[in-house]
Image (cartoon, rainbow, N blue to C red):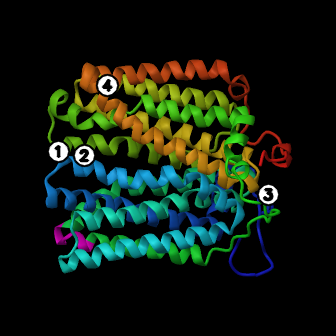
Amino acid sequence: MKRGRPSRRVTIGENASVSPTNDDRRIALLRQRPFVQFAVASAAASFAFQMMSVAVGWQVYALTHRAFDLGLVGLVQFVPSLLLALPAGHWADRFDRRRIVLVAQVVATLAIAAMAWLSGAGHLDERGIFGLLFVVGVALAIEWPAESSILPALVPVADLSRAMALSSSGRQAATIVGPALGGLLYLAGPATVYAVAAGLLALSVVLIATLRYRQVRVPQEPVTLKTVFAGAAFIKSHPDVLGVISLDLFAVLLGGATALLPIFASDILHTNTIGLGVLRAAPAVGALLMSLALARRSIESRVGLTMFGAVAGFGVGTLVFAFSTTLWLSVLALFALGAFDMVSVVIRSALVQLDTPDAMRGRVNGVNAIFINTSNQLGEFESGLLASWVGAVGAAAIGGIGTLAVVAVWMLLFPSLRRRQRLHEADEMRSRPSPG
């Protein structure tokens, strides 16, 4: 997958050997052009969507002044991801993943460019925004299983967790800077934000289009319910994969205290919008710094206990935030919460990718996408509903306690995951026949 000599094609484990030291491995990783190209493309796309989300929220509310319409912004993007995740995962295993990502990003770029042109011309109303957002949601739903299945083929197995941490650092930077940049550009009008976002996404398109990527060819299977749902069957038959994916689902469902930040900022911490911005940024800053640390020094042993410990730390951070009445302690708790979450995210993501054969990655990532999107959306709903019953403090505290309870139960239900020492434990995992 390196650019240059056409004869040089890389799949997992075929890259040149690297130095055993952590610093040298990180430097060697940054010298691998396909990975750097992919990571920059991912960061550019993340910046584009973060900026777009700010402009969409402001513009929709300015047009309608209805809070319900702000909820529709998330809904029109969530529905495609729920409906298309499984088919998109199947397509990612049958067709060229790079081309799928390319087509999806071109569609999203055109939709955002249309938002820029219509906004500049004064012809974009809320119905047009929702329609074009739905198109973007469809593109993202189709892209995600293919895009997340490409990275393992760009780096050696030993460097996958480090590569994921580095790639995540770009997305976390986009989470921190993107909304602020979008808000600043909004002063020149929403069309400006959409135009810049479309430009960043176009940059990602160019980088993906020139990425040298070779997908392992597998025999074409007939499209049946069995092959479409093969990802779910694979996850069910592999306890470690089922354990990490389901742990993510329930931990995010219960630990969604960040959805209640406006209430905590206003009613408990008695701070202003600047304080709210600091609270919102704290988890992303913690995650960013932790991702950089993991890129420098990857987790080499006791990955199972480390992951469970990180999720438990996420629960403890949620509890501290729930009972804090001072801004600095709340910010520190959210910072720690984000850092712990990044540890578990890197371990979970790398473990799923390494335990899944390349021919199954698209379908497994499609199922994973359903878990992730459902937990994020329902987690916010659960937090808001629980807060309406027991208050924001009670809701956050219950979420933290629930997260710790889930960790304890999952350690009992998945003993092999608890005892797991390394991310990549056995090469025979790749040679097992797939369920579909």
Spatial CA span between label 4 and label 1:
24 Å
Amino acid on which disc 1 is placed: Thr
* Residue 293 as seen in the image, left or right of residue 152: left
Instruction: Pinpoint residue 27: horizontal percent, then vertical percent.
Output: 63, 60
Residue 132: name its quadrant: bottom left
Q: Picture coordinates of residue 213 (x, y %)?
A: 69, 70
Q: Of callouts 3 and 1, which one flags the residue occurring earlier in the amino acid sequence?
A: 3
Q: Name the residue under label 2.
A: 277
Q: Name the residue under label 4.
A: 386
User: Is residue 140 located in the magenta-colored stretch of the structure?
Assistant: no
Residue 297 lies in what quarter of the image? top right
Amino acid bearing label 2? Gly
Q: What stretch is highlighted in magenta?
A: 187-192
Labels 4 & 1 near each other (Cβ < 8 A): no
**Residue at 18% across / 45% down in the picture?**
274
Helix, strand or loop at mark 2: helix
25 or 142: nearer the viewer: 142
Give the residue at mark 3: 13
The residue at which mark 1 appears reads as: 273
